[in-house]
Image: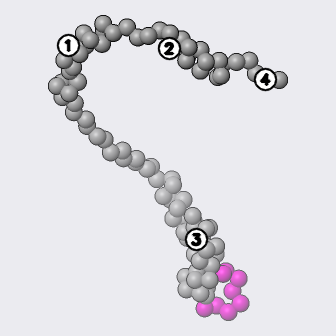
Amino acid sequence: MPLVNYVVNYDYIVKNLCENRNVPQSTCKGKCYVEKELAKTEKQSNSPQTIKIAGLDVFISYDILSFPSQLNAELLTEIPDSSYFNSHSSEYFSRIFHPPLA
């Protein structure tokens, strides 16, 4: 990031932040500032970083997850219409699963 900052803020760095700005005919042009910033970021990247992840505890009550036994019995006695599934599923799968086209 220091290099991007240097390019974007070149004029400001040369005129205000360069250590050699008062020296006539200096070829520094803010490079001293960039070197210091690069050294800072290198120190930060070498130091061990700790990553903190926020955790969220979720509590779900048994009452929310329990279903009435009558509803369970109705679901078990219902028999799905197999012709509906067969006609649509075969059409669906034949569109996706087929040999490659040459």
Of marks 3 and 2, the one in the foreground: 2
Residue type, mark 4 in image: Leu
Residue 16 location, x and y as percent?
55, 86
The answer to which quarter of the image holds residue 81 is: top left
Q: Quadrant of residue 21?
A: bottom right
Q: Secondary structure at mark 2?
A: helix
Left/right placement of residue 59 relative to residue 53 reads: left
Mark 3 or mark 1, which is nearer to you?
1
- Give, as a three-letter code, the residue at label 1: Gln
The spot of residue 64 in percent (x, y) is: 20, 27
- Earlier residue among tags 3 and 1: 3
The residue shown at (62%, 83%) is: 11
Q: Is residue 32 above or below residue 51?
A: below
Does residue 83 appear in the picture of this structure?
A: yes
Which segment did they paint magenta? 22-29
Q: Nearer the viewer, mark 4 or mark 3?
A: 4
x 31%, y 41%: residue: 55
Disc 2 residue crowd, few under 14, some 14–19, many 20+, Cα 10 Å: few
- At label 3, counting other C-alpha atoms closer than 10 Å, the crowd grade (few under 14, some 14-19, many 20 or more) is few
Query: Measured along the vertical axis of the image, is residue 16 above or below residue 71?
Result: below
Residue 101: numbered disc: 4
Instruction: Name the residue carrying label 2.
Output: 85
Q: Is residue 95 left or right of residue 75?
A: right
- Residue at which label 3 appears: 5
Frontmost of labels 2 and 4 is 2
Of 85 and 34, nearer the camera is: 85
User: Disc 3 residue type?
Assistant: Asn
Q: Which residue is mark 1?
A: 70
- Kind of element beneath mark 4: loop
